[in-house]
Image (cartoon, coloured by chain):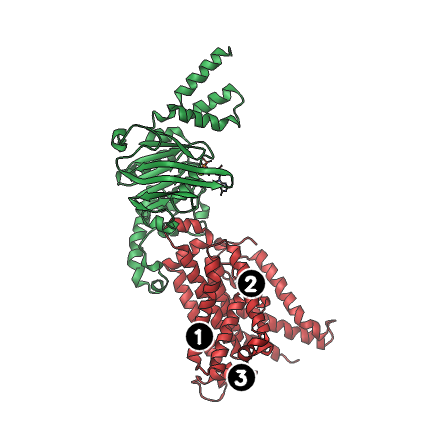
Amino acid sequence: MPKTPVADLIAGPVAPGVKKRNPIIVVDGVSRRFGGLTAVDVEHVEIPANAITALIGPNGAGKTTFFNLLTGFDQPNSGSWTFQGRDIGGVPAYRVARRGMVRTFQLTKALGLMTVMDNMLLGATKQPGENMLRALFRPTWRGREDEIREKAVDLLTRFKLDAKADDYAASLSGGQRKLLEMARALMSSPDLVMLDEPMAGVNPALTQSLLGHILDLKEQGMTVLFVEHDMHVVREIADWVIVMAEGRVVAEGAPDTVMSDPAVVDAYLGAHHDTDLGTLSGQLEVAKDMESDLVRHDLEEEAVADGR
Amino acid sequence: MNLNFVWLALGEALSPTTAAYALATIGLVVHFGFTGLLNFGQAGFMAVGGYAFAITTLKLDWPAPFAFLATIAAATLFALILGIPTLRLRADYLAIVTIAAAEIIRLSVKTAELTEITGGATGLNGAGRVFNELNPIPEGRYGFGVLTYTADQLWLRVFGWALVLLACLIVYLLIRSPWGRVIKGIREDEDAVRSLGKNVFAYKMQALIFGGILGGLAGALFILPRSLQPDNYGTQLTFFLYTIMLLGGATTVFGPVIGSMIFWVVLSLSDGLLSLGINSGILPLTTTQQGPIRFIIVGVALALLVVFRPQGLLGNKKEVFFNA
Ligand SMILES: Nc1ncnc2c1ncn2[C@@H]1O[C@H](COP(=O)(O)OP(=O)(O)OP(=O)(O)O)[C@@H](O)[C@H]1O
Ligand SMILES: [Mg+2]
């Protein structure tokens, strides 16, 4: 799956909050405060449809909180947003999911006391047997059960979990749970998949195949929004990158240019300043993390000037 | 030596009281075992059911079938009142509210203003007579030895256990259905289930109502062989039900039945053995100490059980979700 050209995504000059040609989500003035701390304060942002968008930013930038707000797991202090043109601010989380916007969690929520297969089946929609009265009459839901079981086997095979189908999910490794959670989210064939750090804890070999799956989703017409700290991953699959810092969207852009944006440099260095960055070498470390040539260049110059 | 008490103890296994406890515990398994709802007021559901049945039969002269419908309606209403404010909150809120609500029921039926309807502290007597009007079994004596029953006693046992088996069947079907899958998911992590598009609040409400109805029917069954006494519905009753549930297995369908039978047989057997020991002078105890000691035995047995077999007698160890 080739990357979508930037020109096909945006309708205006590259800047934070830039309009998209075909947005699936449009956010306006969303803020969330925890006591005195403003965790999210997004003026305007649009997520392009049928593309892979990465949401990046330093720890505590508000990415997870932003996910929680969009999916109805948390309520904002102000703001509104639409999904596929419909206002979904204040809509309960389960309805958001039913409308085709499914998320995974940073702290994996595999259901350990159920089998891997049951986890998968739970992700399916339109199972009449989930109605209490119909549940008593097996013939009314057996047909659908067979259908979704087939789909589950299919997905489990793709995610290399088919051998584990009858094991309790508690027996899976951390990385396997991430895979299960992602596969489970796909059971409902959503329009938008929101993944909160899907690669965390997944080994490099599996990361590659996971990236393949995410590209597949795009090919099938889905939209992906994911939070990720690993810039290699972002560069490899993202069509578009949104950078958050201290609750705000500070930059947007194509994956190979956005890291040189001065606002991004500020965001990452600013975020590291009060912690581990007493030394220039520490800053270089961060620069390496970010793979930002611009910062490295700046810092190296500074180092030379200091005569170190 | 008179060993009749052994037979009587075994007869306890099929007594209507055992059936009532089993039924109430099945309700608790739906709440706690399958949905993870911390209901510490199942005694309250039993009280609501018992009063609904007794008041409609004795004060309103309703025939028993309608009184059973009233029991179901009252338990449903009680579940709604408890559930609507608490089921959106953390699990502990339901625990606090149910334990308090059960006590409120027990204490308020005793107030002087309600004595006309509820019978005050002495309760209500005679609901069983109305129920026996339905008895299709011809007059006579049934059984053998000390386990001989009148037609009414037999009818009550047949009816009670039929109700228990019906409840088991429904729970069995529900738990193996997609509905049961959602419920078990909620027990473990509500947010995960919510993120998959399930209306968690509605499911928890359905489970609370269903388990509450079983508790209410158990309350009605419980007063058929005896009079209704408000003080039978203290928190102690709820904890006996928890004992039975843990004994049989909190996540099993038939655990409550086995648990209730063992609970009552052991209570009755230990009673018989203790009086044998006391009367023959082997045990240095008085007959007034006998009652509490039975419960000490049950308590010790339960503690051992939870340590060595937390899944209960019938449960699956991999499904144990509480840490003993
Ligand atoms: N429930 C909460 N109560 C109080 N503060 C919170 C709560 N949730 C998040 N925060 C605060 O909001 C800020 C943003 O947190 P959030 O989890 O959204 O960060 P993040 O961008 O996902 O970080 P990471 O990359 O480390 O996951 C943090 O400062 C955090 O301490
Ligand atoms: Mg986060």
Residue B263 vs residue A203: left or right?
Answer: right
Q: Residues within 10 Å of mark 3 (few under 14, many from 20)?
A: few
The chain identifier of the residue carrying mark 2 reads B
Task: Find the residue positioned furthest to the bottom.
Answer: B139
Pointer 2 with pointer 1, Cβ within 8 A: no
The part of the image, by quadrant, that contains residue A214 is top left
The colour chain A appears in is green
Q: Residue at 42% across / 65% down in the picture?
A: B171
Q: Is mark 2 on a helix, strand or loop?
A: helix
The part of the image, by quadrant, that contains residue B235 is bottom right
Q: Residue at 32% across / 45% down in the picture?
A: A155
| Amino acid type at mark 3 | Thr
- Which quadrant of the rendered structure holds the N terminus of chain B? bottom right
**Tag of residue B99:** 2
**Tag of residue B275:** none
User: How far is mark 3 from mark 2, CA to CA?
Assistant: 39 Å
Q: Residues within 10 Å of mark 1 (few under 14, many from 20)?
A: many
| Amino acid type at mark 2 | Ile
**Compared with residue B242, is residue A253 higher up or lower down, i.e. above or below?**
above
- Is ligand 1 closer than 8 angstroms to the Cβ of mark 3? no
Q: Which of B281 and A45 is in front in this view?
A: A45
Q: Nearer the viewer, residue A54 or B237?
A: A54
Residue A272 lies, in percent from the top left, at 49, 27
Residue A78 seen in render: yes
Q: Residue at 51% across / 70% down in the picture?
A: B46
Residue for badge 1 = B70
| Amino acid type at mark 1 | Ala
Residue A60 lies, in percent from the top left, at 47, 35
Residue for badge 3 = B148
